[in-house]
Image (cartoon, rainbow, N blue to C red):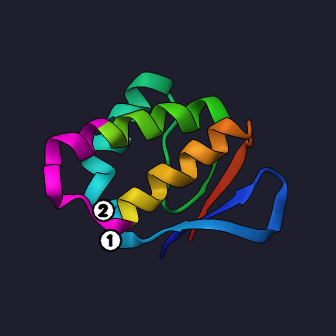
Amino acid sequence: MAIDIYKRKDTRNLRFQITDQLYNSIEDTIIAQFQKKTGVYIDNYGTTILTFQHARILKELLEVESKSAGNDVSKETEMLIAFLSDVYNNETDLDLIGD
């Protein structure tokens, strides 16, 4: 039950996937903070539209959390940060589809 991430309105080409393990590890901290800042909830059972501006905010929240975690940052979190950075730099909006 992962969250599949696609370029907006292009669900044929999977761009990234947030696993259940990663989602569960950031749900109470990063996802909650993101919702407070943006009003957007990343639903692991539904569809969420993530603009490139929101991708930047999510990336920054993950970076702050990663710095406080020190060496305890997962490879998956690092990959998500890099992906969100690319999304922001290329001004790409996303569809996040949970199952």
SS type, badge 1: helix
Q: Which mark is residue 5?
A: none
> Which residue is found at the position 16% from the left and 41% from the top?
68
Residue farthest top in this picture? 37
User: From mark 2 to mark 1, how far is it between C-alphas?
Assistant: 5 Å
Question: In the rendered view, does 1 fall on the left or right side of 77?
Answer: right
> Which residue is found at the position 73% from the left and 40% from the top?
90
Quadrant of the rendered structure where residue 75 is? Answer: bottom left
Question: In the rendered view, does 95 fall on the left or right side of 59?
Answer: right
Q: Which mark is residue 24?
A: 2
Task: Find out whether residue 51 is within the magenta segment.
Answer: no
Q: Are marks 2 and 1 in contact (CB under 8 Å)?
A: yes
Residue 95 lies, in percent from the top left, at 69, 52
| Magenta stretch: dominant secondary structure | helix
User: Would residue 50 be seen by someone viewing this image from the given angle?
Assistant: no
User: Would residue 83 be seen by someone viewing this image from the given angle?
Assistant: yes
Query: From which residue to which does the magenta span run?
Result: 64-75
Q: Amino acid at mark 1?
A: Gln
Camera-side residue of 90 and 28: 90
Camera-side residue of 5 and 97: 5
Task: Count every numbered label the image shows and give the total.
Answer: 2
- On the image, numbered disc 1 is attached to which residue? 21
Point out the image quarter for the C terminus: bottom right
Q: Label 2 neighbourhood size at 10 Å, few (<14), some (14-19), many (20+)?
A: few
Residue 87 lies, in percent from the top left, at 65, 45
